Image (cartoon, rainbow, N blue to C red):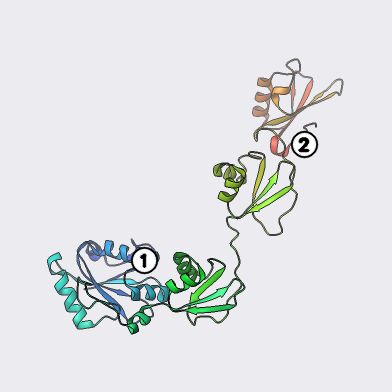
Amino acid sequence: MSFIVLGKKIENYLVKEEQESDVFKTGIYKLVFVGSSNFYIGSTVENFKERYRRHLSDLINNRHCNNMLQSAYLKYGRPFLEIMEICDREECIDREQHYIDTLQPVYNICKIAGSTIGIKLSPEQIEKSSTKVDVFDLDGNFFNTYHSIAEACRQTGADASNVTKSMRTESTSSNNFQFRIHNKYTKIKPYEKSTCDRILCYNTNGEFLKEFPSKLSAAIELDVPVEKIVRNIRGRFGMTHGYIFKDYEKNYPLNIPKHKFGHIRQKSVKITDFYTKEVFEFNSFNKVPPEICYKSALTKGVKDFKGEDFIIKNRYIVQTKSYKTNDFISN
């Protein structure tokens, strides 16, 4: 009886309905990598689902205690879990030892089930379990080869988690270096910095000020809350704290339209006297003198006529524009 755990999410299983409950039982399992004939034998006294989750967490975060499994993960990707046998907790160690003795799994560094005390790796085992790393500069030129991730980190000053991520995704860098699995490439493409988090900053006159690598860096340098920057980019505010922020784009303009001060929902109004042909322009309803028209009448007219021109007191022709498309505000 066996089945395989699959999928990017741990909850996705390739199982039959009658086997679904088995993932919450205890017993013996095998970790298998697609593309490798080697495997790992283990046992769990929790349940198969939780043990698989902890294996994946350690592998993804480059902290697994088994260097051979960590190296296999970097080379082959996420492993599958195959249930070998379901048994009681008290029997797990004995059954695990039986499978280790019978199948001779390569990825089991310790050949004694349930104990790693006194295990010392030979130089050959250390060499075999280590992942060699090829290092390239940002232009894609080969720099050097190191015998392990730890050595690559020591020599280049890069962070171990970033090195692992660079080897897995082949799209990131660390400390001005790119990292790849040994002998996979002789030359790689130049590194292209991600533009997803970069933003542009302008003043209220629309003049370009600076490009920031992230919203957080802009918030720290300009003393502007991050949430205000996000809202400004999304168009919630025309400007914030005296700045206008935009998402990064290639060949970005050095000048943008000047900011027009006022509330984003503010209405400018143009009133024409039908008899005298005199024209009045106001940047909000509050500025309209009561002798011409009250604010409540303007608000009702906009609501009733849905933004179209309308007449008040059988004398005044009223035209309104929203703040964003305001053509009527006088300087």
Quick one: SS at disc 2? loop
Name which residue type carries label 2.
Asp
Residue 295 position (above or below residue 97)? above
- Between 81 and 221, the one nearer to me in the picture: 221
Return the residue found at the far bottom: 124
**Quarter-of-image position of residue 225:** top right
**Quarter-of-image position of residue 148:** bottom left
Near mark 2 (Cα within 10 A), the count class, few <14, some 14-19 or many ≥20, is: some
How far across and how far down the image is residue 215, in percent?
Answer: 58, 50
Return the residue found at the far front: 155
Q: Is residue 100 left or right of residue 39?
A: left
- Tag 2 or tag 1, which sits nearer the N-term? 1
How far across and how far down the image is residue 125, in percent?
Answer: 33, 82
Q: CA distance from mark 1 to mark 2?
A: 61 Å
Quick one: SS at disc 1? loop
- Between 285 and 134, the one nearer to me in the picture: 134
Disc 1 target residue? 63
The disc label shown at residue 301, or none: none
Residue at figure coordinates x 58%, y 46% from the top left: 219
What quarter of the picture does the N terminus occupy?
bottom left
What quarter of the picture does the C terminus occupy?
top right
Residue 294 position (above or below residue 326)? above
The total number of labels drawn is 2
- Between 112 and 56, the one nearer to me in the picture: 112
Closer to the observer: label 1 or label 2? 1
Near mark 1 (Cα within 10 A), the count class, few <14, some 14-19 or many ≥20, is: some
Name which residue type carries label 1.
Arg
Residue at figure coordinates x 14%, y 73% from the top left: 94
Residue at figure coordinates x 54%, y 71% from the top left: 178
Disc 2 target residue? 327
How far across and how far down the image is residue 48, in percent?
Answer: 25, 65
